[in-house]
Amino acid sequence: MPLNLAPASLRDRVVLITGASSGFGEATAELFAQAGARLALSARRVDRLDALAAKLRALGAEVRVLPADLADPHAAQQVVRDTEAEYGRLDVLVNNAGVMYLEPIDIADLARWQHMIQLNLVGLIASCQAALPGMRTRKDGHIFNIASTSGRQANPNGGGYSATKWGVVGFSESLRREAYMDNIRVTVIEPGFAQTELRERISHPATQAALNSLAHSMRQLQSEDIARTIVFCAGQPAHVNINEILMRPTDQER
C-alpha cells in the first residue's frame, strides 16, 4: 500500500540518506521520493542501491547513488560533498547507517566494536560536520540522527551498542544547540524493536536467540513506520523542530 503522507513542502528538497540499501533507509528514500524530493543514497551494497534507484527513477524521482563505507569518516564527509556537488546544496541529511553487535563485555571482539563505534557514531558525526557549512550559509537545513531505545536503557550484552546510541543522543543535542540560530533543525529518532536486518549480525548466539524470541512475541515496528515519522518531522514549518521521538512497539514494555 503506497504511503501518501508526505507534505508538498518537501518537493525538490535535496535529501541524503545513509544506510539506504535496506530497512529504515530504503523505506525513507521511497517516501521522500513520493514527496518529490531529490535524493542521494549511500551505503556499501552497490547492487541494492542501484536496484532502489532504478525503482525510484521509474516513479519519476531524481536519484544519485553514492556508494561508500560510512565507517570511514572521510568517506562519510565525502558523500555530503558529493551530494552538494551534484545538486548544489543539501537540505536534509538522514544519518541512518549503523550496525548492532551484541556480546558480553568480557568476551567482546573489540575490533568489531571499534567498527560499530566508527559507523554508528564517528561516521555520523563526520557527516554532520560536513553538512554544517552549507546549511549555515543558506540558513536552512534539517539533520536526522537515528538512535535507539538502547540509547536510553542499557542492557546486558549491549554495552558497545548502547555506548554508540547514547553518544548519538548526546551529540545530537549538542549539535542542535550549536546550530539552531542558523535555522538548522536536528531530530533524533529512537526506535525500539523493529523488523529489519539488524539482528542478523549479532555474533553471540544466546543473545541473538533471546532477542529474536522477544521480537517475535510482539508486533514489531516496520521500516515504513520510521519513514513516515522522519518525513512527518521534515515536513513541519520552519519554526517547528521536533527534537526527539521515542518509538516503541505497543507491545514493548521497555
Image: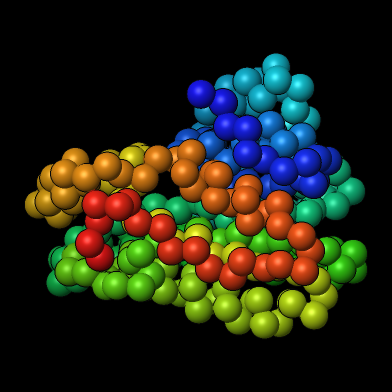
Tell me what residue is drawn at x 15 percent, y 54 percent: 207
Q: Is residue 40 visible?
A: no
Question: Number of callouts in the render?
Answer: 0
Residue 218 versus residue 77: which sits nearer the camera?
218
Q: Is residue 131 left or right of residue 138?
A: left
Q: Which residue is found at the position 41% from the left and 74% from the top?
A: 166
**Residue 122, how many percent across, how many down?**
53, 67
Q: Residue furthest top?
A: 58
Q: Residue at x 35, y 56 (%)?
A: 248
Tell me the quadrant of the picture where the C terminus can be found.
Answer: bottom left
Please say if 64 is above or below 107.
above
Residue 246 seen by the camera: yes
Residue 237 image position (x, y, % from top left): 77, 60
Give the image quarter of residue 236. Answer: bottom right
The picture quadrant where one finds residue 162 is bottom left
Q: Position of residue 155 (x, y in %)?
A: 21, 69
The answer to which quarter of the image holds residue 152 is: bottom left
Vertical side of 6 occupied by 158: above or below:
below
Q: Is residue 169 left or right of residue 191?
A: right
| Residue placed most toward the observer, 62 or 203 | 62
Residue drawn at the location 49% of the way across and 47% of the way down: 226
Q: Is residue 52 left or right of residue 11?
A: left
